[in-house]
Each structure stands twice: as structure tokens, then as C-alpha cells.
Image: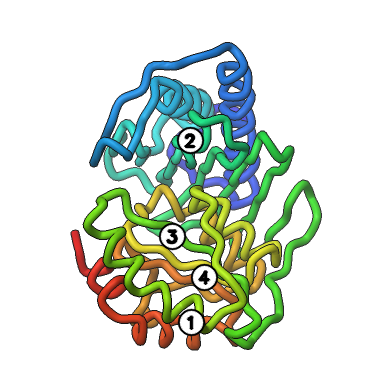
Amino acid sequence: MPVTDTAVPSAAQLLDLAVEAATAAGKMLRASSAAGPTTVGAKSSRTDLVSDLDRASEELIVEHIRAHRPHDSFLGEEGGAAGGAARVRWVIDPLDGTVNFLYGLPVWAVSVAAEVDGRTVAGVVHHPPGGETFTAALGGGARCNGRQLRVGSADELALALVATGFAYAASTRVRQAEALPVLLGSVRDIRRAGAAALDLCWVAAGRVDAYFETGTHVWDRAAGALIAEEAGAWVGGLDGGPASDAMVVAANPGLAGRLRRLLLEAGAGWVLAAEEP
């Protein structure tokens, strides 16, 4: 993609650039993980980790995109917002699943989404350990390594495999654990992988039937939410409105409402967690 001015390219063109950037970052991360230990720090708590490779990955992605789109703005997990009020904004999670990555668990990914006038139009979640690249352009469907994705058809909670994540704050996790009996008694089972972007992609691929989590951020879900939606999933919040940091729910349309009602029934653990800043 050549260097442009402030003109807005198509969603497909933005997706191509996102894939290039995410793939380059994934290659760097794999090579760096094989090279040995990295520098690690903490963010919101001692268990919420960040590494120098998170920052290096984000810098690589931003530099790659800026070489083609110098006037765009950015929102990254590590670098925050930059670039002003351009019509195109790139939302970046340079290493989703940092704890997994640092422990050598093969569940981590690079997530890059492109917004135009505030709406996500292209997204890629690149999963180097699995050799998979999940992609979507608005109105163009979702794919994994070029293969069309379609959300699963389960519409009974009792038969639904549900993915989730837990808060970093121990006090919140305790309340979430107190609510788990209601959930575990009503669904097939629960999975906790530790990478929100991949959880959303796995809904798109039918590998899990649904996903919910409190405490995500826009960079965690921007690309994955578009991929899930383009595969036919309903993605939103606990009240039926848009997904937010408070809560994101993703499932096929026949299951989503039932899962939201179950979460409300589960009560304090998830609902109170969703209300926390």
C-alpha cells in the first residue's frame, strides 16, 4: 500500500495494512520469545504484567502503519492515544495474553483494528503459536487463513461451551468465583484461555459457543469483536447495548439473550464487577 494523504481507503485496503503490521509484530515476538528472558513490569496490579516486548511490538506496528498512513491516529495499549483527530484510527493490542506469553503458553496474539469515523471497519487477530490469522472487513465476512468463519449454532445454554476471563484484582475475582456456581450449573462448561481477542475469534470460528468478560478495554476487543460479528455473532453489553469495558458478551443471536439473563441471575460477582471503573 503506497504512502497516502488523509484520504480514507477501503476497508479491504486497511485490512491488508493491518495484516502486514500484525504479522511483522508476530514474527518479532516469536523470535524474541525463543531468544530468552525479557524485562517485565506490572500495570494495574502485581499480576497484570507488561514486558518490553509489548512495547516493542506496538512500536513496530505503529511505525509500519505510519510509513503508509502518516496522518492517521492511534490508540495502543502501551502507548495510549496519538495522532489527533484523523478520520482513520488504529486500535492496537500488541500482545494480547502477555502472561501466557511470558509463561510459554501458546495462547497469545497480536490484535490490530482500523476505525473510520469511530466505526471499526477492519480487524486482524494474528495468533503466531497456532499459525492462524483471523481477519474481517466490515460487510465482507470473517476468515481464518482465508477460510470463511461462521459462529456456532448452539441455542441451549445447557449445551453451550462458554469462554470467559477473570479480573486481575483479587477482590473482584473472589466475587466472580462466588457467582460461578450459577454459571457452571447452567452451561456445558466454562473455558478461560487468557486472551480476549482470541476468545472472540473462537466464537467466530465456533470453537466456543459464547464469550463474556468484564474489564476488557477497547484494544482487547476491537478487532475480535468485528471478526465475531462478521461471522454472525451478536456482540454487546450486559444491558443489550454496545460492548464496553464494563462487559462484553459475544454469542450467536439465539444464545446471546439467554446468556445475558443468566449473567444477571448470577448476580453480584459479574454484575458488580461490570459496574467497577
Q: Distance between the residues labelled 2 and 1?
A: 29 Å
Q: Distance between the residues labelled 4 and 1?
A: 9 Å
Badge nearest the viewer, 3 or 1: 1
Q: Mark 1 points at which residue?
A: 259
Residue 38, compared with residue 165, is above or below; it is: above
Q: Looking at the figure, which quarter contains the N terminus? A: top right
* Quadrant in the rendering for residue 254: bottom right
Residue 250: give its label.
Answer: 4
Q: Mark 2 points at which residue?
A: 95
Instruction: Choose the circle earlier in sequence order: 3 or 4.
Output: 3
The nearer-to-camera label among 2 and 3 is: 2
Closest to the camera, between mark 2 and mark 1, is 1
- Look at mark 3 in the image and give the residue it sits on: 119
The first of marks 4 and 1 along the sequence is: 4
Point 29% across, 71% down: residue: 269
Mark 2–mark 3 distance (CA, rounded to whole Å): 22 Å
Which residue: 37% across, 38% down?
76
Q: Which of the two discs, 2 and 3, labels the residue nearer the N terminus?
A: 2
Q: Distance between the residues labelled 3 and 1?
A: 26 Å
The crowding category of the residue bearing disc 3, from other C-alpha atoms within 10 Å (few below 14, some 14 to 19, many at least 20), is few
Specify few, some or many for label 1: CA neighbours under 10 Å numbering under 14, 14-19, or 20 or more: many
